Amino acid sequence: MQPAVVAASRNFVCIRLLTYENKSEYDFMEGLLGVSPGTLPNTVFCILAPDGKTQLVRAGRGPRHGFSGARSMADGLRRIALRYPARTGQARPLPLVRPVDLALNVAASDNRPLIVTVASDPRQLAVLQQQVQQLAWNPRFIGQFIYSSTQRQAALKPLAGAEPDAAILIVEPGAFGITGKVVAQLTLPTSPATMATAFTAALDAFVPSRKDHNRHIEMGYQLGIEWTTVVPESDRQSVRAKARFKARFQSRR
């Protein structure tokens, strides 16, 4: 991503779509694109006004239909932002991916460590999230972690090394995003300084895995690993490509 685009995007609420992992979002995206039910592609881009309805940049598969390039996009974002000045004093929310198993899969796909906040009491969980939120938007940590939260200890089952009294877990995702290894965990009470030290140490120690796309998929088939989405994938081109790849793999067995 171009730095000018990233800088301009700071004036927007940027939403990472779950696409096939959330039915209500799936339906909303179909409405934006104006496609037939059950045909949503696997990428969608749109810029909406604060009313959540008015399309300022028409919905499509990506930003290329609205902008000729990175410079055009950065300029366009700045112009749009001037039309909708932000309210002052509003805290940016923690960008959560839930449930934990989905966040683990996203972390593996993005090659980023995962931070999970854990508390059975919803009020305590909200306090934890607020503490992490204050660090998440620090320039040192922006875009460096995937975040999730849970009230259920059972949700931590894929995370090797998770202690029952841990309130904040820092996790290194496995290659296929179905398991993870806890590399640091904090119990309560904790402090922003302690959290920042732990986040920095985990980030400095994290080594993104190198993956060959085709080899990675083939290894997943060999191990019997295949992710099932909440909503069946409906991007026809992607579905056909996966079917061809799987058929080639099975023909060599």
Image (cartoon, rainbow, N blue to C red):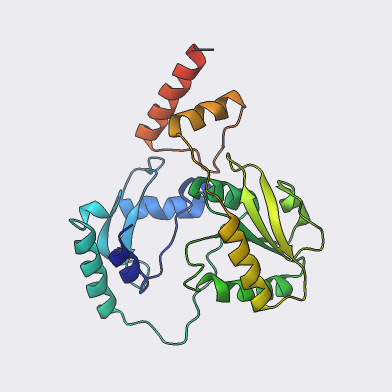
Q: Is residue 73 above or below residue 174?
A: below
Q: Nearer the viewer, residue 8 or 149?
A: 8
**Quadrant that contains the C terminus:** top right
The relative height of residue 31 versus residue 75 in the rendered view (above or below) is: above
Q: Percent position (x, y) of residue 222?
A: 58, 23
Q: Return the residue found at the far right.
A: 164
Image point 27% across, 55% down: which residue?
A: 63
Q: Position of residue 175 (x, y in %)?
A: 58, 40
Q: For this rendering, which residue is in front, 99 or 220?
A: 220
Percent position of residue 61, x then y: 30, 48
Residue occupying image coordinates x 40% and y 85% = 87
- Residue 212, by quadrant, is top left
Q: Look at the picture and state if 192 lies above or below 61.
A: below
* Pick the front one: 114 or 100: 114
Quadrant showing the N terminus: bottom left
Residue 204, visible in the rendered structure: yes
| Residue 147 visible (yes or no) | no
